[in-house]
Image (cartoon, grey):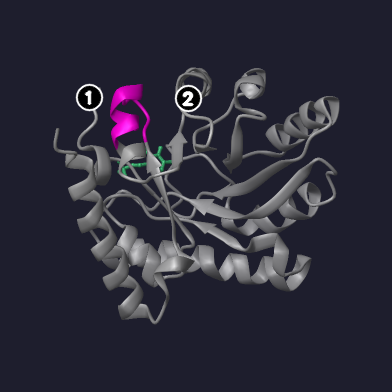
Amino acid sequence: MKNAIKETLESVNEKIQAACMRSGRQPDEITLIAVSKTFPPEVILQAYNAGIRIFGENRPQELRDKATALPEDIDWHFIGHLQTNKIKYVVPTARLVHSVDSLKLAEALEAFAAKKNLTVDVLLEVNTSGEISKFGFKPQETLAAMEKVMPLNHLNVRGLMTIGPLTEDRALIRAAFASLRDLAQKAKDQFGPQSATILSMGMSGDFEIAIEEGATHIRLGSAIFGQRGK
Ligand SMILES: *Cc1c(COP(=O)(O)O)cnc(C)c1O
């Protein structure tokens, strides 16, 4: 059977390469996360067979169920809002939690990881657009939050994540991504280069802008799997 995802991936990779060319970057600086939320294991396997090994999920139990059903060499990333009572489904299954959006969640993750004697790699989610529907720290409170999260022994802060604004205005999207990059630079100055090596930004509609503005991790759902049902 023809693997349609494989062809789609080729065209996505060409777009990634073109965005890198435009901005003087190397394609191997970009990590592609295939956002497989709502898609069943057999569809995820098609992407796996096309070579993808990093998948993103935004629902804790769905992540747990898929991780159990699918090959062990998959790296799962958690990208959704996480309630503290659901941490057990996400840790240690997810290799990176992109969406630490409150100090309460950071502290609960720390307590859980300490009890299990493990370390969790995390990003702080920043609400760069100010849209009230979005989770995340306000840009102006992010460095103070980071200062509190950095000392937590069982969390490893690797960088920042944002979701671009919901708009057709490319300039606004670009400004949001640029503001995350500036914030990451400030974090590096204040807490050291290791604190913000990862910039997770860019989805199907805006990943090329995100790459141009410095994304290291892009999160693509519909561009790879097609439209999600509701
Ligand atoms: C669903 C989702 C994505 C992927 O969205 P697409 O527009 O389908 O690429 C990326 N990031 C987060 C946080 C998501 O929830």
Question: Hey, which residue is sitting farthest front in the picture?
Answer: 1
Is residue 45 placed above or below 122 in the rendered structure? above
Residue denoted by label 2:
59
Please report the bounds of the magenta region as a residue range: 36-46
Q: Position of residue 9 (x, y in %)?
A: 25, 51
Numbered marks: total: 2
Residue occupying image coordinates x 66% and y 20%: 88
Residue denoted by label 1:
229
- The kind of secondary structure element at disc 2 is loop
Quadrant of the drawing holding the C terminus: top left
Is residue 23 in the magenta section?
A: no
Is residue 26 placed above or below 155 in the rendered structure? below
Label 2: few (<14), some (14–19) or many (≥20) C-alpha neighbours in 10 Å:
some
Q: Earlier in the sequence, mark 2 or mark 1?
A: 2
Give the Cα separation between the discs numbered 2 and 1: 15 Å
Residue occupying image coordinates x 36% and y 33%: 36
- Which amino acid, by three-letter code, is at mark 2? Arg
Q: Position of residue 69 (x, y in %)?
A: 46, 19
Residue occupying image coordinates x 38% and y 55%: 202
Report whether 1 appears left or right of 83.
Answer: left
Residue 100 visible in the current orientation: no
Give ligand 1's quarter of the image: top left
